[in-house]
Image (spheres, coloured by chain):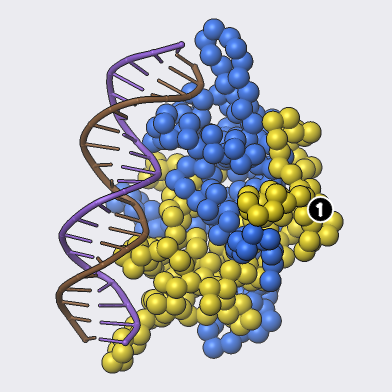
Chain colours: A yellow, B blue, C purple, D brown
Amino acid sequence: MSQLDPCGDFQCPIQFVVDLLGNKWSILVLKELFGGDSHGDSFPKRRTHELLKALPGISTKTLTMRLRELEEQGLIKREIYPEIPPRVEYSLTPKGYQIQPVMAALHQVGSKWLEQEPCVCPLQEIQPFEPIVAGKGNGRVADENTPNNSPPSDDKFDPITETREWSAAATD
Amino acid sequence: MSQLDPCGDFQCPIQFVVDLLGNKWSILVLKELFGGDSHGDSFPKRRTHELLKALPGISTKTLTMRLRELEEQGLIKREIYPEIPPRVEYSLTPKGYQIQPVMAALHQVGSKWLEQEPCVCPLQEIQPFEPIVAGKGNGRVADENTPNNSPPSDDKFDPITETREWSAAATD
DNA sequence: CGGGATCCGCGACGATACTG
DNA sequence: CAGTATCGTCGCGGATCCCG
């Protein structure tokens, strides 16, 4: 049991978040707001066109929709500068910043999985490569018969190296 | 730089995970496999119809698709029992278990947000956004300095040490 | 000129019916 | 009971047009 919503809307916290940010772009948009590529600095305000080029594949329509949703949920702030070349800047709110642990966890797992990626590059059949991070040269994912199907202790969870280093995908 | 993919497929770890699990149901399916409601025990094997009723709104088609994807990605294991009433059980693999930190973070944030939820129930008292920023600035992510941007002063971030307590989503 | 709203087409998903 | 096939709906990308 977690929280009893007086409205009778019992819900799993995870489901709640997924319901809010589980669509195709919300997390990525927030990620950019966490420091997409200017991770050398604090949390940046991003302009619309910046987000558009930082998120290859997103359309202006969808971007706007996500931005509106996130704003409505209080996760981001939208600032309009009544200048002649219109300028709109988006930034995280304190509430939006609260997903930092999620971002950190995603980054951690993503990094781990990227290492394990077999790399489907046709040019090089690729072998278990273990370049960047030394200490875990797994090189293969769980196949049919994985050695350990039992619960925990597969890997240790690093208390989230937090900070914002997850902007490795500098879109610029 | 983080990971240099020899295929030239540079990618943000977060984007990578979102790309894998960013669809409508993957995370929720995995959540169920983490212990949807039988969190008192270890990670359960779940049968198809269990997942179907544990995930209200999902269709059999989509469930199957997600399950196949997750299996292909090595996150879950599929066991077929050649019995007359067909039985198939799904369970986490070690790799699948690696998203535990993500689940924990989602649960943490979700719980926090659920508390802050104004509760749109007309019968109940509405609680406006309570400024969590009181005085617990324990210097988290952007504590290097706080530039012009007023980095959101989050309340407290618990280092996701918990194991699996997020299974508040009782399947019933 | 940048922000974003509208119309169109595609692909993903839900609901249902059907197969083994 | 598990999974597939079909159809209708909706989210979302793409281009275009409008606003300040």
Can you say whether A160 is above or below B62 in the image?
below
Can you say whether A61 is above or below A106 in the image?
below
Amino acid type, mark 1: Lys
- Residue at 69% over, 64% down: B3
Q: Quadrant of residue B70?
A: top right
- Residue at 68% over, 71% down: B1
- Residue B49 location, x and y as percent? 48, 23
> How many discs appear?
1
Residue farthest to the right, as pictured:
A135
**In the displayed structure image, the side of residue B114 where residue D8 appears, left or right:** left
Q: Quadrant of residue A108?
A: bottom right
- Residue B154 location, x and y as percent? 58, 70
**In the displayed structure image, the side of residue D13 where residue D2 appears, left or right:** right
Q: Nearer the viewer, residue B112 or A74?
A: A74
Q: Nearer the viewer, residue B60 or A91?
A: B60
Residue A130 visible somewhere in the drawing: yes
Residue A156 visible somewhere in the drawing: no
Label 1, residues with CA under 10 Å away: few <14, some 14-19, many ≥20: few
- Residue at 50% over, 51% down: B22
Q: Nearer the viewer, residue D12 or A118?
A: A118
- Residue B12 location, x and y as percent? 60, 63
Name the residue beneath numbered marker 1: A136
Residue farthest to the top, as pictured:
B84
Can you say whether B124 is above or below C17 in the image?
below
Q: Nearer the viewer, residue A158 or B155?
A: A158
- Residue at 61% over, 41% down: B73
Badge 1: chain ID: A
Q: Quadrant of residue B76?
A: top right
- Residue B53 location, x and y as percent? 45, 28
Secondary structure beneath disc 1? loop
Residue farthest to the bottom, as pictured:
A84
Can you say whether B138 is above or below B40 in the image?
below
